[in-house]
Image: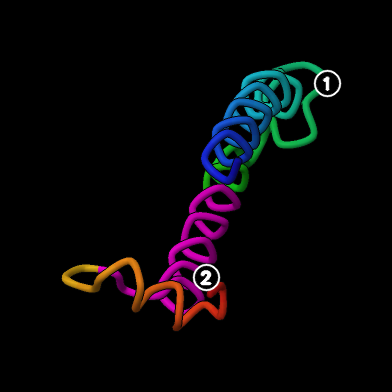
Amino acid sequence: MGQSFGASVHWVFAALITFLTPIFLDKSEGWLKDDPWIIFAFFACMMMLQLIWVLTKFPETKGVSLEEIQKRLGIS
């Protein structure tokens, strides 16, 4: 369930980026036509926030048994 949700979110946002970037960067009417670096800086900042989220919210599971993971997450 979680992996399919993650893949779905990935594909939706990949489609949004593909759709919105040309609109923002259009030479005649784009909002960011004079400063195209802003959209790439935005995406870079979002990736940094994602990295921070993963490092702080997702537990390390290397070398940990499934039973221990369940205990840590309060599933059992």
Q: Which disc number belongs to residue 76?
A: none
Say few, some or many: other residues with alpha carbon within 10 Å of mark 1 (under 14 / 14 to 19 / 20 or more): few
Q: Amino acid at mark 1?
A: Glu
Residue position marked by numbered label 1 in the rendering: 29
Closer to us: 56 or 28: 56
Residue position marked by numbered label 2 in the rendering: 53
Residue located at (51% from left, 61% from top): 50
Secondary structure state at the residue bearing disc 1: loop
Residue located at (52% from left, 40% from top): 3
- In terms of secondary structure, what is the magenta stretch mainly? helix
Residue located at (56% from left, 80% from top): 74
In the rendered image, the vertical position of residue 44 relative to residue 1, given as above or below: below
Whichever of labels 1 and 2 marks the residue nearer the N terminus, that label is 1
Residue 5: image location, x then y, percent: 63, 39
The magenta stretch spans which residues?
A: 41-61
Residue 66: image location, x then y, percent: 33, 66
Q: Is residue 15 left or right of residue 76?
A: right
- Residue 16 drawn in magenta: no
- Residue 48 drawn in magenta: yes
Q: Is residue 23 left or right of residue 65?
A: right
Q: Amino acid at mark 2?
A: Trp
Secondary structure state at the residue bearing disc 2: helix
In the rendered image, the vertical position of residue 16 relative to residue 37, given as above or below: above
Disc 1 vs disc 2: Cβ atoms closer than 8 Å?
A: no
Residue 15: image location, x then y, percent: 65, 21
Q: Quadrant of residue 75?
A: bottom right
